[in-house]
C-alpha cells in the first residue's frame, strides 16, 4: 500500500487482531475503542487475563525514529519511578509494524479524573512535573520537533487560508484579527528560550488519579520550554491562576528549578495552541472520526466565536504576565 493510499480505512477488526497475534498477544475480549482522535486506541483483555491497551499510530504523522523517542522518554521516566503509561517490551521491542501500521501495546492504567481544584492533587502533580522535567532536561529529543512558530503559527495560518471552513462573510474579519494575533505572538516569542523534553500536551485529561497522578499519552512529546507542561493546568480568573501557580511552583522546585523566566510565555503559548488547534481540526476533517466528534467545527457560529477569541487573546497578551508570590 502506498503512502498516498494510507488511512485508517484498512484498519479492520481482523487487521487489529492479526497485528496483535503477530506479536504473541491473543485478545480474549472484544476491542473497546477508547477516546482518541489522532491515533486509534483499543482496550482489551488477553488470554492471560491481562488488561491491555493497544495504540495504532496515525499513518504518516510520526516516523519510526520519532515514535521510538517517545517510547525511550517514557522508559526514562519509568526508570526514574515516575508514574507514566509506558509501552510494553515484547522480545525487547516496543514498536511493531503490521501491514504498514505502526503499533504498540501498553498495560491498561485506570484511574479517576484529576481534580484541578484539589490543592493536594495539584501539589503532587507539581512535584511530579518537576521530576519529569529533571529527566527531560538530561538530553534533548533528536528526531522529534521543537515547539516553534513554523509548526504552531505559520503553517496553521496557511492551512486555514487554503481550507474552505471559514464562512465567506467572516473571512476578512477572521484573517485580519488572526494576522494581528500572529504579529503580536511573533513579537512576544523568544526563540532562544531553554528547551527540554516535554510531555507536550499536559492538560488535566491526560492525568489520571489513583493514589497519585498517572501521566498518560506522550504522543505530543517534543522539545520546548518547561512552562508548556505547566500553563494548561491553570484555570479560572487571574487570582485563581496565581494561587495555582504558587502551589505548583513550590512543589516543582523540590526537584527542578522552576522556569520563572518563562512565565511571560504563558499567553503566547496559549495563542499558539489556539491557532494550531483550528488548523489541526481542518487538516483531520477527512477522517470520519472528526466530523462525528466535532460537528460544531463546520458551523458558522464556531468561526464567529473564534473572531471574538482572537480579540480576547490579544487583550490577554497586553496584560502583565503572571508572577510568583514573594518567598520569605
Image: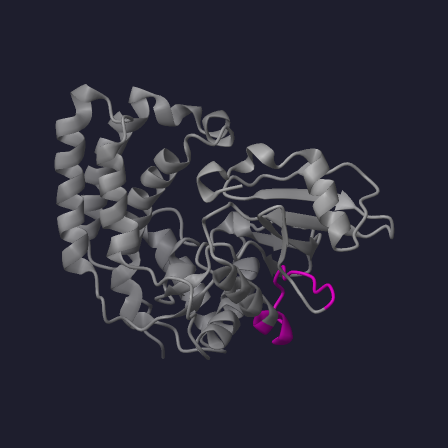
> Which quadrant is the N terminus positioned in?
top right
Q: Quadrant of the C terminus?
A: bottom left
Q: Quadrant of residue 259?
A: bottom left
Looking at the rendering, the stretch of residues picked out in magenta corresponds to 76-91
Q: Is residue 79 magenta?
A: yes
Residue 244 at x, y = what percent?
42, 58
Q: Is residue 231 above or below residue 173?
A: below
Residue 285 seen in the current view: yes
Please tell me whether residue 146 is drawn above or below residue 17 in the rendered image: below
Residue 93 appears at what percent x and percent y? 67, 65
Instruction: Return the residue nearer the eye: 68 or 259.
Output: 68
At 62% across and 46% down in the image, what residue appears?
99
Is residue 323 visible in the rendered structure shown here?
no
Q: Nearer the viewer, residue 315 or 71?
A: 71
Asked which colour scheme the image uses, the reply is one colour
Image spot of residue 78 (x, y percent): 63, 70
Amino acid at each position: 500500500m502506498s503512502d498516498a493510499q494510507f488511512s485508517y480505512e484498512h484498519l479492520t477488526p481482523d487487521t487489529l487482531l492479526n497485528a496483535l497475534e503477530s506479536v504473541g498477544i491473543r485478545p480474549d475480549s472484544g476491542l473497546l475503542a477508547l477516546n482518541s482522535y489522532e491515533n486509534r486506541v483499543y482496550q482489551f483483555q488477553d488470554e492471560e487475563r491481562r488488561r491491555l491497551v493497544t495504540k495504532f499510530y496515525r499513518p504518516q504523522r510520526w516516523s519510526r525514529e520519532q515514535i521510538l523517542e517517545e517510547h525511550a522518554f517514557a522508559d526514562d521516566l519509568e526508570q526514574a519511578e515516575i508514574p507514566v503509561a509506558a509501552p510494553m517490551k515484547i522480545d525487547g521491542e516496543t514498536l511493531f509494524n503490521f501491514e504498514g501500521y505502526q503499533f504498540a501495546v501498553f498495560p491498561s492504567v485506570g484511574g479517576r479524573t484529576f481534580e484541578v481544584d484539589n490543592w493536594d492533587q495539584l501539589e503532587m502533580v507539581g512535584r511530579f512535573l518537576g521530576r519529569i522535567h529533571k529527566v527531560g532536561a538530561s538530553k534533548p529529543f533528536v528526531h522529534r520537533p521543537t515547539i516553534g512558530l513554523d509548526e504552531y503559527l505559520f503553517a496553521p495560518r496557511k492551512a486555514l487560508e487554503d481550507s474552505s471552513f471559514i464562512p465567506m462573510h467572516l473571512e476578512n474579519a477572521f484573517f485580519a484579527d488572526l494576522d494581528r494575533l500572529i504579529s503580536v505572538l511573533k513579537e512576544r516569542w523568544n526563540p532562544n528560550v531553554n528547551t527540554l523534553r516535554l510531555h507536550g500536551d499536559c492538560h488535566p485529561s491526560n492525568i489520571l488519579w489513583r493514589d497519585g497522578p498517572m501521566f498518560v499519552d506522550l504522543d505530543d512529546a517534543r522539545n520546548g520550554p518547561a512552562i508548556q507542561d505547566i500553563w494548561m493546568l491553570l484555570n479560572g480568573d487571574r487570582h485563581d491562576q496565581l494561587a495555582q501557580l504558587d502551589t505548583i511552583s513550590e512543589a516543582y522546585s523540590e526537584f527542578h528549578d522552576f522556569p520563572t523566566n518563562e512565565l511571560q510565555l504563558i499567553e503566547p503559548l496559549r495563542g499558539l495552541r489556539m491557532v494550531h488547534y483550528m488548523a489541526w481540526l481542518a487538516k483531520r476533517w477527512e477522517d470520519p472520526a472528526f466530523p462525528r466528534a466535532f460537528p460544531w467545527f463546520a458551523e458558522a457560529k464556531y468561526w464567529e466565536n473564534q473572531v471574538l477569541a482572537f480579540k480576547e487573546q490579544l487583550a490577554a497578551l497586553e496584560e502583565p504576565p503572571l508572577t510568583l508570590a514573594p518567598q520569605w
